[in-house]
Image (cartoon, grey):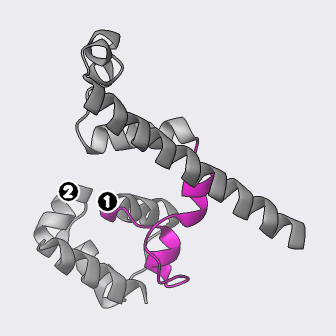
Amino acid sequence: MLKDRLILLRREKGYSQYEVAERLGFSRGKLANYEQGTRQPDYDTLEIIADFYDVSTDYLLGRTDNPSFPQEEEQEDSLEQINKLLKKYNIDQSGFFDIEKWKSMGPEEIKQLESYFQFIVSEAEKKNKDKNTSSDTD
């Protein structure tokens, strides 16, 4: 399974073996051996590969078909998730939380902001309600 996932991920990213090997600090031959299944990476190398492709080691090993980290994401601090979103969308934190910018908002912008806040609070309440309901049945 590992060899198939390595090939799939590399091709999805449009990389050659040479490119991946160079970025990971491996020889192309070492990477080729992993992709052919003639050699297995050690744990540290497996983590390096998973980090490079932004997938879990469980996904690489075929223990799950979900390449993301669902349990980690749920456990992750909300503030950390928000910071990741700010980075993802190139939102300057100092600008985002700049009170002067907030003061200059017009009535329509404030209404729109309020609807965003209502949505966020509503979704959080639903999630907490669902979480409490599922833990009650456990």
Q: Position of residue 62 (x, y in %)?
A: 49, 85
Number of numbered discs present? 2
**Lateral position of residue 11 relative to residue 138, left or right:** left
Circle 2 SS class: helix
Which quarter of the picture shows residue 73? bottom right
- Which amino acid type corresponds to the residue marked 1 in the rendered image? Phe
Residue farthest to the top? 100
Looking at the picture, does residue 127 appear above or below residue 112? below
Q: Which residue is mark 2?
A: 23
Q: Quadrant of the N terminus?
A: bottom left
Q: Is residue 4 above or below residue 67?
A: below
Q: Residue at x 29, y 26 (%)?
A: 107
Range of magenta residues: 53-77
Q: From the viewer's perspective, is residue 25 above or below residue 89? A: below
Is residue 76 highlighted in magenta?
yes
Check disc 2 and give the amino acid type.
Arg
Instruction: Pinpoint residue 71: horizontal percent, then vertical percent.
Output: 61, 62
* Foreground tag (1 vs 2): 1
* Residue at x 44% of width, y 67% of height: 46
Residue at numbered disc 1: 52
